[in-house]
Image (cartoon, grey):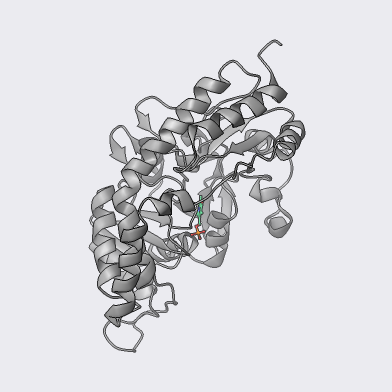
Amino acid sequence: MIRFFDYRPALATMRDEIDRAVRRVLDSGQLILGDEVRAFEQEFAGFVGAAHAVGVASGTDAIVLSLRALGVGPGDEVVTVANAGVPPIAAIRAVGALPCFAEIDDETMLIDPSRIEDAITPRTRALLPVHLYGQPADVAAIRSVADAHGLGWIEDCAQAHGATRGGVSVGSVAPLASFSFYPTKNLGAFGDGGMILTGSAEHAERLRELRNYGFRAGLVSYREGMNSRLDELQAALLRVRLVHLPAANRRRVEIAKRYQAGLAGSRMRLPAIVTNTEPVFHLFVVRVSDRPAVIERLRKERVGYGVHYPEAVHLMEGYRTLGGVPGQLPITEQACREVVSLPLYPGLEDADVDRVIDVIRSVVGDEGG
Ligand SMILES: *Cc1c(COP(=O)(O)O)cnc(C)c1O
């Protein structure tokens, strides 16, 4: 059996450091908002190249609080994509705003900057592009649109810790950037966690208040906030994993290259890599015209797989009130019908990758064959 994801091989390579970090936190007498969170915020901000970092409870909360920092609320619209799963949409709804969807690029499956204006209305307040599957979106083009319309924007970096475009790290360009440390992400906690990066000291100060009920020093609230804190234990473990992140990302890229080479010439579409970008392959997503057949074979051969994501969010039952209709986003909807994610995580062995390649090739065959 080949698992779709397993954190345990990576954990085994750093077990002593992890165990020491657990002991350090448990013995410290401080479990919430202490030295570990402060240190991890600084270290992660340094890794990405942002001035300020605010640790929060999840990647979804990182978007919610970023939207609040931008002043987005009920009646406002936020432009994002419909093929990046539910969390960005859930975050937009959590502040009472309305998600509006921009079409994606058929090759990269990332937001198409030239289509963002189609979704902008007088009520649009912000843009929320996603660096999907570890591929950096075109932040320069997105910034031009945001600036031309006087909009705030947030980079959703939940799947792209360490990815670069034109030598610039994702999460260092927009006024605000959200990260998730959900266990499967490139930088994964042993539980939930998230972070917001910003170049603005004012945003950072407001976010520190918002994540902790609007408190400053004591228990008096200075703005309506919530409880969304990264805890000391997760922060300490994330500090250990951050040290290993560059090597983990390099291994992901190596596996992706092995898939690219092994699957070249088969009847499927492989991830398109934009020149001058360094993707970090949170997921290795291929596109097949007959997905049910491919999935059936993977199941039979006990090869783990994922579908990210099985339906465009505007068509999901849970978001029916948004009034989405089939055909509204043809490129997005087609992508959702065709995508399959293959196993890819730092502890996956080359032999397993080769086996996945063999299984896939046995069902999709060769181009023209
Ligand atoms: C995982 C993810 C999130 C949310 O992160 P959580 O920590 O699970 O709340 C947001 N956006 C994208 C694109 C994600 O993949």
Q: Nearer the viewer, residue 118 or 236?
A: 236
Q: Nearer the viewer, residue 259 or 10?
A: 10
Locate residue 235: give its quadrant.
bottom left
Residue 299 point in image, percent of width and height = 72, 40
Vertical relation: 165 (above or below) 61? above
Quarter of the image that includes the C terminus? top right
Vertical relation: 73 (above or below) 180? below
Q: In the rendered view, does 15 fall on the left or right side of 117?
A: left
Q: Residue at x 75, y 37 (%)?
A: 300
Residue 108 point in image, percent of width and height = 51, 31
Q: Is residue 269 visible?
A: yes
Locate residue 147: give its quadrant.
top left
Residue ranking furthest to the top: 368
Residue 345 point in image, percent of width and height = 48, 43
Q: Is residue 155 visible?
A: no
Residue 117 point in image, percent of width and height = 50, 40
Q: Nearer the viewer, residue 364 or 215?
A: 364
Quarter of the image that includes the N terminus? top right
Q: Residue at x 29, y 55 (%)?
A: 44
Locate residue 285: give its quadrant.
top right
Q: In the rendered view, does 340 fall on the left or right side of 276?
A: right
Q: Nearer the viewer, residue 99 or 166?
A: 166
Vertical relation: 264 (above or below) 329? above
Number of labelled discs? 0
Q: In the rendered view, does 303 fall on the left or right side of 190?
A: right
Vertical relation: 264 (above or below) 322? above
Q: In the rendered view, does 348 fall on the left or right side of 145?
A: right
Q: Residue at x 35, y 78 (%)?
A: 31
